[in-house]
Image (spheres, grey):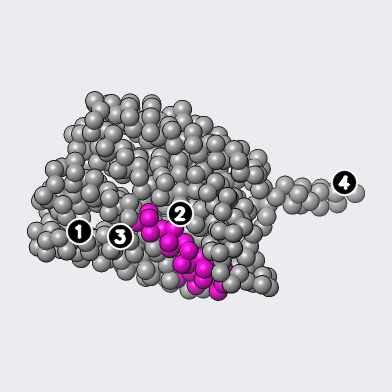
Amino acid sequence: MLRLAAASLAGTAIEFYDFFVYGTAAALVLGPLFFPTFSPVAGTLAAFGTFGVGFVARPLGSILFGHFGDRRGRRPVLVASLLLTGASTVAVGCVPSYGSIGVAAPVLLLVLRFLQGLGLGGEWGGAVLLTAEHAPAGRRGLWSSFPQAGPAVGFLLANGVMLALSATLTDAQFARWGWRVPFWVAGVLALGGLWLRSSLAESPRFLEIDDHARVPLAEVVRGHWRLVLLTAGALSVGYAIFYAVTTWSLAYGTERLGVSRTVILACIMAAVVVKGSLTPLVALLSDRYGRRPLCLLGCAAAALWMFPMVALLATGAPLLMFLGFLGALLAFVTMFAVLGAYLPELYEPRVRCTGAAVGYNLGGVLGGALTPIVATALAEHSGRVPWGVGAYLTGVALFSLGCFALLPETRPVGVVEVVEVVEVEPVAG
């Protein structure tokens, strides 16, 4: 289990590195380089538009890779998705700017971002299911949290490289070639991920299925459509929080508040370190107290914290910005740390790869794709404190709270109780 969980974490971290490095570049440099005829705000919105295309592609990737995951196994999905995401990310770093090839530059950027999202849409289902279906029922939350910690590791890798380049290069060097380096690094990381995943065994739960779904998506739409919509709505707040903190606030802090990109990146990264380190602990609590209660708690905390977060961000003070980001990401991790166990438990095994991944990635469209665009537009028409952004995020949190309230609990309580009885009774005898 430890080797499997480590390989899942490493692979997920690599794929999310690819995804996040684009978001950071969109916030910092892609607007002027690929949309130079736009105003600064319009250029940022256009860059975030290409960022959002990746989220639109993710559910399609879930359908494509989920089909093969439910028909052929979880393991092949991990290899194919990693290859697609890695190759498209390296290619982004090679796209000439608008000044060199004109309108073809943003078009190529859009296509590659779509392919990147397509690959990531297949990654989550394969990595999480392979770990969850190997894990013992009483510790499924804990083991499934390893791939859930991958996004935090990927974010830190992506922004660590960006931070190092930003601190050592001039603005002109960074805009000319420095921003491309993290995309090229993705190729080396992808090769390492493929090596790690080459020895993984297929999920035992998949091998037990006698009658595989012929068209998994059709079965999901016919028998699980309500569950897919509820999970997508429930997860939208997590995406909204994460990308408000890691993408929108980066653009807002540098462009509107005049904060150094090095300073605000460091604040965000410090908050992500705390969030990532707490992921296994929160997941362990879900094995004891349940998945749904923690998700409801995280949603409620998010609804209460969004206005304080934007107020702390607007100060421009590093410590206060860090506290605002930290509070938001603590609410986030209370929900998302348990999803590696929760979503697979909600869906039957024969359509699990498609159903869980489609629900997970549709939440990304609702929360992740729209949030940087909506938040940038709302902040443009507000004063120094973007209260409109706080209201928007609070509304998303309340919507997700309602969706989580309609989902059932899935923690296998009976399994845990049987294990405890078996361990205690011989001692008493």
Q: Is residue 73 shown in magenta? A: yes
Q: Is residue 72 above or below residue 57?
A: below
Q: Which residue is mark 3?
A: 113
Alpha-carbon span between mark 1 and mark 3 = 10 Å
Q: Amino acid at mark 1?
A: Pro
- Vertically, is 53 above or below 194? above
Kindly tell me whether residue 170 is visible in this rendering.
no
Name the secondary structure under disc 3: helix
Marking on residue 428? 4
Q: Main secondary structure of the magenta part?
A: helix
Q: Position of residue 327 (x, y in %)?
A: 43, 33
Reading the image, the residue beneath label 1 is 106
Q: Which residue is mark 2?
A: 361
* In contact (CB < 8 Å): disc 3 and disc 2: no
- Circle nearer the N terminus (4, 1): 1
Measured Cα–Cα span from mark 4 to mark 1 = 71 Å
Q: Are marks 3 and 4 in contact (CB under 8 Å)?
A: no
Q: Nearer the viewer, mark 4 or mark 1?
A: 1
Is residue 380 among what the camera can see? Answer: yes
Residue type at the position of mark 4: Ala
| Residue at screen point 49% across, 44% down | 233
